[in-house]
Amino acid sequence: MSNHAVDLGDDQLNDRIAAGVAAVERLLHDETNRGASFVSDKAQHLSEAGGKRFRPIMALLASEYGQTPGSESVVKAGTVVEMVHVATLYHDDVMDEADRRRGVESANSRWNNSVAILAGDALLAHASRLMSQLDTHTVEHFAETFEELVTGQMRETIGAGEANPIEHYMAVIKEKTAVLIASAGYLGAYHSGATKEQATALRTIGGAIGMVFQIVDDIIDIFSDSQESGKTPGTDLREGVFTLPVLYALEEDSEAGEGLRGLLTGPLGADADVERALELLRASNGRERALADVQRYLDIVSAECSALPDIPATHALLSLASYTAARVG
C-alpha cells in the first residue's frame, strides 16, 4: 500500500477513507507540534517520515459499521493508535540499535538512545491527551493494549527460554504487532457507535490481519528475491533472529533441519553462511508451514467478515487481508 490512495474496491469508500487519513495526518502534525521545539522536532521525526498509516486505515474502515463513520472521535482514535505505533518504533530502534527506519535515519542514530526514548515518551504523552478528549473506556482499553505491547517487547527481549519456540514467537507477534491493529479495529468501531458484537469482531479481524502481516514479512525476509521486495534476504538470520519459517525448519527431522541446527547457533556473520542457511531453508518445509498459519488467520478474517453486514467496508477488509498475504508472491 502506498502512502497515497488505497483502492478498497468502492469509489465512495475510497474517498471517505482518504479524507479520514488526511484528517489523521493533520491531527498527528498539530498534536505533535507542541511544547519546546527540541521536543517537537524529535517527536515529529518519524511520524512525519510517513509510513503506510495501516492502523488509521483500519480504524476508519471499522468506523463504517457505526452511525458516524470517520467522525472526529474516530479520527482522534486513529491518531492515538498511530502515535503509539510510532512511539514503539522509537523504542524498538533503541532496543534493536537500528540505523534506518522508514527510509530516514532512525532517531537513535541521529541523536542518541536517550533522546529516542524521550521522543517516544513525548508521543505517548500526546496520545494520552487525545484519549482524555475521548472517554475513560478508551483510556482503559488503551492501558490494556499498551501493557500487552510492553509484554510482547519484553517477551522478545528475554527470549523463549524453556518455552516452545514457535508458541513464543506467536505470542510475541500477537502482543507486539497484532494487538495494535486489533486496537485500531476496535476503537474505530466503538467510536462510530457500532454494536459491541461488531466492535469485538473488528478487533479480531484487525488482530488476524496483524498476524498475517508479520508472518508474511518474515517469509519475505527469507524467501523473496531482493530485486522484488527491496529487502536483503536473510536480514533476520544475520541478526540471529529466528522467525516462524526458520523455527519450523529447525524442528524438522530432515537433512535440511539437521544442517540448520548445526549452522544456526547465533547471528550469521559470513555471507556464505547466510547463503547456505537460505538454501537449507528453501529445502525445508518451513515456508509451507508458515503459509499454513497465514491461511489459518485468513480463515478467521473470512469467518468474522461473514457475520458482518454486506457493505463495501466488509469487502475491503477481506481484500486487505488477501492483499497482505499475496505479498509473499
Image: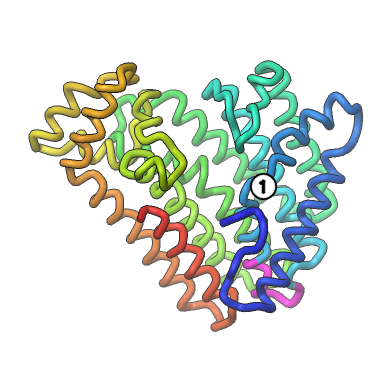
Q: Residue furthest bottom?
A: 310
Q: In this rendering, would 125 be left or right of 280?
A: right
Residue 175's x, y, as percent?
50, 42
Instruction: Please tell me in which quadrant of the rendered image residue 282 appears.
Output: top left
Residue 42's x, y, as percent?
77, 28
Q: In this rendering, would 320 be left or right of 26?
A: left
Helix, strand or loop at disc 1? helix
* Residue beneath the point at 46% across and 62% down: 323
Residue 155 to residue 63: above or below:
above
* Residue beneath the point at 83% across and 27% down: 39
Residue 168 appears in view: no
Q: Which residue is mark 1?
A: 142
Residue 194 to residue 21: above or below:
below
Residue 69 appears in view: yes
Residue 129's x, y, as percent?
83, 43
Q: Is residue 64 magenta?
A: yes
Q: In this rendering, would 157 be left or right of 122?
A: left
Instruction: Please tell me in which quadrant of the rendered image residue 57 appears.
Output: bottom right
Residue 127's x, y, as percent?
76, 43
Decide whether the magenta segment is chiefly helix, strand or loop.
helix
| The one of 311 and 230 positioned closer to us in this rendering | 230
Look at label 1 and name its amino acid: Phe
Give the magenta range.
61-68
